[in-house]
Amino acid sequence: MNFEGLDPGLAEFASAMHSTLDPVLDAHLNPSLLQNVELDPEGVALEALPVQESVHIMEGVYSELHSVVAEVGVPVSVSHFDLHEEMLWVGSHGGHATSFFGPALERYSSFQVNGSDDIRQIQSLENGILFLTKNNLKYMARGGLIIFDYLLDESEDMHSLLLTDSSTLLVGGLQNHVLEIDLNTVQETQKYAVEIPGVTIMRQTNRFFFCGHTSGKVSLRDLRSFKVEHEFDAFSGSLSDFDVHGNLLAACGFSSRLTGLACDRFLKVYDLRMMRAITPLQVHVDPAFLRFIPTYTSRLAIISQSGQCQFCEPTGLANPADIFHVNPVGPLLMTFDVSASKQALAFGDSEGCVHLWTDSPEPSFNPYSRETEFALPCLVDSLPPLDWSQDLLPLSLIPVPLTTDTLLSDWPAANSAPAPRRAPPVDAEILRTMKKVGFIGYAPNPRTRLRNQIPYRLKESDSEFDSFSQVTESPIGREEEPHLHMVSKKYRKVTIKYSKLGLEDFDFKHYNKTLFAGLEPHIPNAYCNCMIQVLYFLEPVRCLIQNHLCQKEFCLACELGFLFHMLDLSRGDPCQGSNFLRAFRTIPEASALGLILADSDEASGKGNLARLIQRWNRFILTQLHQDMQELEVPQAYRVAGGSFCSSGDSVIGQLFNCEVENCSLCRCGSETVRASSTLLFTLSYPEGSNCDKTGKNYDFAQVLKRSICLEQNTQAWCDNCEKYQPTIQTRNIRHLPDILVINCEVNSSKEADFWRIQAEVAFKMSVKKHGGEIKNKEFALADRKDLGNPEGLLLCPSIEELKNVWLPFSIRMKMTKNKGLDVCNWTDGDEMQWGPARAEEEHGVYVYDLMATVVHILDSRTGGSLVAHIKVGETYHQRKEGVTHQQWYLFNDFLIEPIDKHEAVQFDMNWKVPAILYYVKRNLNSRYNLNIKNPIEASVLLAEASLARKQRKTHTTFIPLMLNEMPQVGDLVGLDAEFVTLNEEEAELRSDGTKSTIKPSQMSVARITCVRGQGPNEGIPFIDDYISTQEQVVDYLTQYSGIKPGDLDAKISSKHLTTLKSTYLKLRFLIDIGVKFVGHGLQKDFRVINLMVPKDQVLDTVYLFHMPRKRMISLRFLAWYFLDLKIQGETHDSIEDARTALQLYRKYLELSKNGTEPESFHKVLKGLYEKGRKMDWKVPEPESQTSPKNAAVFSSVLAL
């Protein structure tokens, strides 16, 4: 409600107004009004609270049934009838909420919602109640427990909320935008700009959103886009209230007068069918609230703030005889609401009283209300005595007080052991008499034990106790298994559960509630997903890779750039690196290094993943360095100082390359010095460290320095001695890299024991250093909350944060004058002591911060997996979430979860083994100009030669785009793709007869067609590429794809054959330019092509002609029903399908009047589904096969 037209003095409800009244209970006041209310002797006296005596309720006529005090002297700001239970909710100006049960208004719950702001709107949901205050949205259970507390910006001034569906909420106020909030994720999903600020009232029908503004206007907005469809200028002053019912909108408000705003006694009524005003309705009260109360007619209830209420028809005349009076205790009525059943009215006044008016003696608030849960009464005083002599007496009847001490029954986990029970072996008689039919065995029942009963033995008597053989499917939502108690759930290997719909009904958001994109693991050799994420979150590497583009068919840098682009566009949906891994499998060096796993080895976990990912790390850095090695560095990567890299070097080399000097000293005194470079270092551990059980302390910096400045004895050729001699080889460093990459090489129990011992020693030293200040994690977190964690304050870590930690978050490295290297661990305390690291860089001193750790998860059940801890920087959060902060995350394929920074350096060597470390120079991003310039140009769409040797011009099926035909933003392009199968689907048959997909079939795109969507050549394709493949095709799917053996072979094909990269660049250019793709089932097409397309650029006919909770309709049936075309007779043809999809989209625009008449189009869809059910969704067989390829529009194509 808007209060601009009221006397400003009424906004202050001070208790001093009633200071002269004595606190004496009025004789006419019902004592039930003071249910559990403590009166303030200095506040409002009850003598000033006259309440009307109870009257007899007449059926059909509204009369006062009950009055009750919600909060003495505090004005009621809002009232709301619960939509699910028989309850009335009341909010006060003091931020207090109270609920009353039933028509007797028995107090149910009462709690504080906000300490300072008034409650402005209440909305009931199934599981709780939403409360809106000035800049806070709070969701609380009906008993008062907080479910979530969503803080809005301090500058917001919210006044209204609207529940659009069960999980979406609109919130508006005095600012120039309306927020859309998802109640499942408790996140802001949209921010709609509002041309007229001040949205204080919102309503909804099946056609529009209605927004009431403080300026006196009511705007009608589209349900999907929230754009203004119509606007009513109701009042010249301000709007007080409005309501919508059927085709009528009624509003009341204030008009401008010479002396200010005055309440207008004319109600404005509008007809929503013709979108115009009808005759205003003159009433006999000053309207402040109004509601439609449709029972037998569309009655309007008009309420004034002085308590007068009038009923009238919106299209008739107001009768003074229809006025009744509500006797408020205070001077003003502040709120009004109508129950869903229309049997009850609620009024709240300025003195905290609530008045319930009903039209029947026993009203119900809702047509169908569920039962309300009440707190159980205290049973302590009524417990019967217990007889200790009864052995079967349940001791749980004894009430035990709440205590924080450890109970005797709380047995320590260290003294417990899991004891799962395994099924007993099958009876030998059954095995002897069994007959097998296929894989099912049949045997007569020997009747040696009871039917359907199996005796179990405990672990002590079961000598063959071992682990189960089943593999768990998902790390979240399953029961905890005793064999996996060491591995935390979020670290376990994740797998996708496939259904008959594929991935469409798999809930990826359950595993990833962030806006960063995960990677799918089902593709061959996807073990490198974690390393792809590490490279992506290195800002200079990401920008460099996305700026790169070359002509090489299988270039890992190009494919990685395409994948990074998808990760940029994704808003939390997982991506897949199928094209990158396809190119990876073609690199001979990758195969030679053993980086390409067979499917059987990958599924069984036979490969040593830790060694594998470390080899892959070295390979990818070397390969990217070679792919991007050019004579000149791109302009976007000029160093801030103005210099370029050395000739022939790449920016990958500048980022990762470390110049070293190898010195070989023979025992004859001859010394040989060679200069070389390396992209990463491997940790070299002290000799005999596995035998040192005394706990000798080695800093990580010491081990790192030993590994970089390596010294070893080996046999080498000596030119002076002219033979192999024992030599001492040392390595000195000349130049430090910007990114320090370290392979941990924890490949045996020797190295694992070294990490474990060093972590134990570091833990003891930390405990000794902090003395008695170390606390448990819960107490440490409580201290941080109490202190507010001010910036720069070093807080004491908890015991859990110090366990299994040896790795420092930062290291300090300095080049000495005699070519030596000093390395030491660096902490925040060191920075406070020595000053910022940036100032020391001038003297050759650099501080490196830990950016990522890749770890090997040891899990015998699933063969293990690889995950990454990554410190995501400010720029990524700014692009994805609009905030600037740094946060550590766990990346486990498509599972992404924020973690505490200490978790990134904690390694329990029993199951979590470090593999790769990435340290980055502090302030690295400021050294580079990180602009991304899209390297894909329009020339990719021009004509190109075919790879096929036998292709002739007579076989051309498309006309390439001319320069004057280049697509623009919003242009339509018809798209269709055909696929072949590389690997068959792997499935298993369950015992109940259902099929479970273990691994889906691997598809590869074989043909891509793009058709012009407008212009004189509309319908003529400009891309019709067959994709050459070097991988073995298992099934060409000719019946569905039209692809035949030989079509993809450059030696014998007569088609226009190209590489996948060439066609991919064409589609990427179309996406980047902003065209809209029209097709049927495009979601699967883009997934197999490995493209991420914004949703507003996809017009999919499978969804345009679809009703919720109904089946998807095939393109063939839609073409027959709407276009009278019979397509896909013998095989599918992508040109035919793309043209048909374009025609269907034109038909959709025609039937729905460009989307403006959804109701009429809904009737068309109902007819479509009725026809489909009658014909069993089958198209009648054509009398003569005709194909759109023979249409006149293709004559120009076939004549080429």
Image (tube, grey):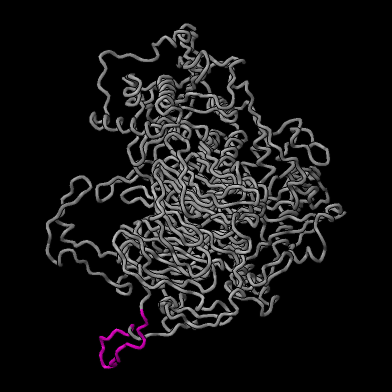
Residue 755 shows in this picture: yes
Is 391 included in the stretch rendered in magenta?
Answer: yes
Is residue 1035 placed above or below 1188 in the rendered structure? below
Query: At x 61% / y 51%, what residue is drawn?
Result: 261
Q: Position of residue 375 (x, y in %)?
A: 38, 75
Where is residue 834? Give x, y as percent: 82, 63
952 in relation to 772, above or below? above
Q: Is residue 649 left or right of residue 1033?
A: right
Front one among 242 and 563: 242
Residue drawn at x 44%, y 42% is: 599
Tell me which corner region of the image, top left, top right, bottom left or bottom right, holds residue 309. bottom left
- Answer with the quarter of the image where residue 978 lies: top left
* Main SS of residues in magenta: loop
Q: Relative to 411, is 1179 on the left or the right?
A: left
Q: Nearer the viewer, residue 469 or 95?
A: 95
- Image label count: 0
Identified at 83% across, 53% down, the residue is 841
- Residue 1044 belongs to the span the image colors magenta: no
Residue 1074 at x, y = what percent? 57, 29
Q: Is residue 727 visible to us here?
A: no
Instruction: Report the residue that reaches farthest toward the top.
Output: 1199
Foreground: 1154 or 186?
A: 1154
Residue 778, horizontal then vertical, whole percent:
57, 72
The residue range painted magenta reads 377-396
- Most foreground residue, 883 or 66: 66
